[in-house]
Image (tube, rainbow, N blue to C red):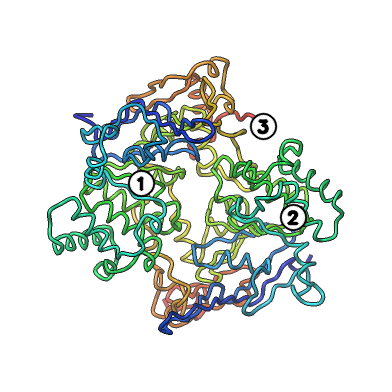
Amino acid sequence: MTAPLLAVRGLVKHFPLKKDVLGRGGGVVRAVDGLDFEVWQGETLGVVGESGCGKSTTARLLMHLIEPTAGEVVFDGARVGSRDLPLKAYHRQVQMVFQDSYASLNPRLTVEHSIAFGPQVHGVGRREATERARSLLAKVGLEPRRFAERYPHELSGGQRQRVNIARALALEPRIVILDEAVSALDKSVEAQVLNLLLDLKDEFGLTYVFISHDLQVVRFISDRVMVMYLGEVAEVGAAESLFEAPRHPYTAALLSSMPSMDPDRRIEQAPLAGDPPNPIDPPGGCRFHPRCPRAEAVCAQRAPARAGIARGGVACLMHEPGSGHAAAPGAAA
Amino acid sequence: MSGEPLVRIEDLSVTFRGGRAPVRAVGGVSLDVQRGEAVALIGESGSGKSVTLRTLLMLHPARRTAIGGRVTVAGRDVLSMRERELADYRGAVAAMIFQEPLLALDPVYTVGDQIVEAIRRHERIDAGAARARALGLFERVRIPSPERRLAAYPHEMSGGMRQRAMIALALACRPQLLLADEPTTALDATVQIQVLILLRELQRELGLGIVFVTHDIGAALEVADRIAVMYAGRIVEEGTARELIRAPRHPYTIALLKGRAHGALTRGQRLATIGGAPPDLSQLPPGCAFAERCAWAEAACRGTQPEPVTLAPSHRARCLRTDATAAAVSAAAAGAAATAPISAAPHVAPPR
């Protein structure tokens, strides 16, 4: 296949801020600010970044749970929300699993009803939908005879997340967006759910967008990884090469912030100082420059080019020929 | 180990009543923490690690909690203290930082005022001197432009800054013991490592004893001198950070580390998992609580509660099969060129 399953072009989401009683404030939160990326059939795209980088907003934009300020999402060649691909048809193809397994289930529905609900809305008969729900429960490792009639509060966190996965699969989607879907689980349960996700991907030929702050898990599950910083793409690349040889200084800092797992090789100096800045008023030039250990004067003035980054690459002046950064290719040494 | 330890917990048990059945959250925990030592309690949800920590400050609802055993902190018997003594003890001898500073700090006072209030509750000192000390604390925890930040409300600070402010507040009355409940869990990766390094500095420079609870083994290894692994309300293994990462002997520790060691997460390979789920704390089995999920378990494991086995002066595990696990761990280490400390062990019981 030569076209991506999902293509995101120039996606922007600004949330306006309310003015206070004195009429002050009223800026915008630039949660997502010009995103281009692609998701290919059968792959897992990992999305990493710190709070405020826009990864969850991106997930909600992909699901069309919120209206983008600008830009478009193209699914299998058709623009989402256009006449060729109305939202209801799109939602059959793209489903989502959230972090909070409890909040995302209706407490008054048995898990079987929760799973069968979506198919029924989309015109599947009640009996067939229930059958599908039961078979999906079995697929996610919850024996239907024991679990079908239970309510969400009667399940553990891991079991509830399995139900959420079954529900996401009930419409036989092609893409599943997993927004911190394993982050709230204990490590041993997390491992079980990650294994389940791998199995289901094989069995149903799924494509995943896997959003997480846990770099180890992203590395484990992803084919390609997109690193976000303050609403923009910093770097996109194959998981192994990005983790082995990060090109963006932010990616490098993120990786070297991971605990060493060895009491004899503790991290002596934090790679970055301070917190990620606020996306209300992002810094000019390269948005990472105030925290970047490699920043030069030019980084405050000029935003790195992002042309073609959807296919992989890095948005950093150090890697941009003739950018004026001393480390850039072709710069006078 | 000379002299009295800073913290001595002896056979602590904590049972919560008021639900359908009493829940025995902690059953028979014994732990010493020396002055200036950092100890991490690790384990999964419901293992009793936070309950143990909170007992050190007596933060449980008194009416619905039955506490047994003995807890001594800096020579004081914590369990027998009355309200008034507790108020003097909290903050001045032992202080706690929490996972969510936004919930722990008071939203309607500036952080500076909260620190001044805490100092003046415990010491006869005028407001100016207290404020000067607060400023010093903010500098100590490396809050940039500290003077301006003292006048800030909690919601005006970023997450990492708030966590630093809470640490400053906890240190306000010069405690000897700092308790931390998942102090970095809510923080971003690049901020988490900053806070872990800060905790290490405070331990070293102020001679603080630190007990911190985390489910993140990486965070524990970054700070702790010793680590205690909890499961179903008991410490199942305890040793120095090195001992636990290089030579774990309890099957639960082995399984826990296996999932997280470097190289354990290899792309395209299935993860080793621990089958099953932790036991219900209101219906604990008579024997080892991990036996149902353990690949090494024998009939004897299910019959009696294993007593701690001393493996090295500082290393103990509550397991009857430590010989078998030792063989498995060293065989795996020899095989795996020891880059990944644990990729050991047969495993594991199928999920039920």
The reply to whether dot 2 and dot 1 touch (C-beta < 8 Å) is: no
Helix, strand or loop status at disc 2: loop
Task: For residue B180, say whether it is visible.
Answer: yes
Compared to residue B187, the image places residue A60 above or below, namely below
- State how far apart marks 2 and 1 are (Cα): 42 Å
Name the mark on residue B180. 1
What subunit carries mark 1? B
C-alpha span from label 2 to label 3 = 26 Å
Q: Residue at 48% of width from left, 56% of height from top?
A: A255
Residue A65 locus on image (x, y percent): 66, 68
Which image quadrant is residue B81 in?
A: top left
Q: Dots 2 and 3: beta carbons under 8 Å?
A: no
Q: Secondary structure at mark 1?
A: strand
Q: Position of residue B293 (x, y in %)?
A: 59, 28
Quadrant of image for the N terminus of chain B: top left
What's under tag 2, amino acid-wise?
Answer: Leu
Where disc 3 sits, the SS reads loop
> What residue did someone put label 2 on?
A206
Residue B352 tag number: 3
